[in-house]
Image (cartoon, rainbow, N blue to C red):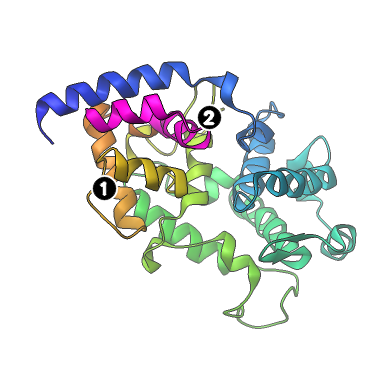
Amino acid sequence: MRASRTRALKTLLDRAYNEYDARWIEPDPVQFVWRYDRLGDREIAGLVASALAYGNVGQIKKSVERVLKLLGKAPARAIDRLDTARTIEALGDFKHRFNNAADVACLLVFLREMRRAEGSVEGFFAPGGVVTDVRSALESFVERSLALPRDGIYGSGTLPADAGVRFFFPSPKDGSACKRISLFLRWMVRSDSVDPGGWTCVPRSRLLIPLDAHIINISRRARLTRRISPGWKMAEDITATLRACDPEDPVKYDFALHRMGLFKREDDLAALRRA
């Protein structure tokens, strides 16, 4: 990218970052994470909210609300004491598009096992301490998560290929952009008026943009990527463009770009196209 375009793009993106602050959070699921003061509770709320962050916004909020209500005011403590049979019974007829009560219960069991193994979700994500390669860390996190004990959910033996909980744990190995896990990482690693932060294991500079329909559309229109097919490589390409504007914190622009698309801010989008 030419230096002149980088400067022009950075000016517009920095302006957007400053404009689209906490006042624009509704209806973003990050609002669920802000409910809690303790990092352990935020990890649980964040992974639940990001896992269910697909489909209709209203349904996302309803589904996340139902799961977090089950966990009460101290989600981490509830996870540590999780009774699987009672959880499935309490979730009852839970349904969120592709996922049902068993899938969510298995996610909660995995969270319990992560905390048992490493003391926190962060500890499980980065058992070696600092993460320098997010792709490798994600691949390892997904593989180790899906191998955790699951209290008989989906039967005994190897986790079935069609187990719904797998939808919560996509891997870069499969070419997936891992949008929802990248969203979770953004919430946990970055710290400003939108992202709560708290994790220290991943440098902000290594985060990857969460690639959803709004980001794909804007990135194509604003020439932030030349790639056509959505997936991990497109997310890397867009992030590389944003990194040229802010090497230390490229994903800080994600929320602003998403808001431009969600609320159809055509003037802002047109300015980006002209940069």
Choose mark 2 or mark 1, whichever is in front.
Answer: 1
Label 2 sits on what residue type?
Gly
SS assignment for the magenta stretch, majority: helix
Q: Quadrant of residue 136?
A: bottom left
Look at the numbered disc 2 and give the secondary structure of its residue. loop
User: Counting residues from the N terminus, which is met first, the one under dot 2 or under dot 1?
Assistant: 2
- Could you tell me residue 229's position as x and y percent? 32, 60
Residue at the image position 27 percent from the left and 18 percent from the top: 11
35 on left or right of 6: right
Mark 2 = which residue?
197
Q: Nearer the viewer, residue 94 or 139?
A: 94
- Could you tell me residue 174's position as x and y percent? 39, 68
In the picture, the disc for residue 247 is none
In the picture, the disc for residue 237 is 1
Label 1 sits on what residue type?
Asp
The magenta-colored residue range is 252-275
Res 126 seen here: no
Q: Nearer the viewer, residue 46 or 80?
A: 46
Q: Residues within 10 Å of mark 1 (few under 14, many from 20)?
A: some
- Could you tell me residue 272's position as x and y percent? 29, 29
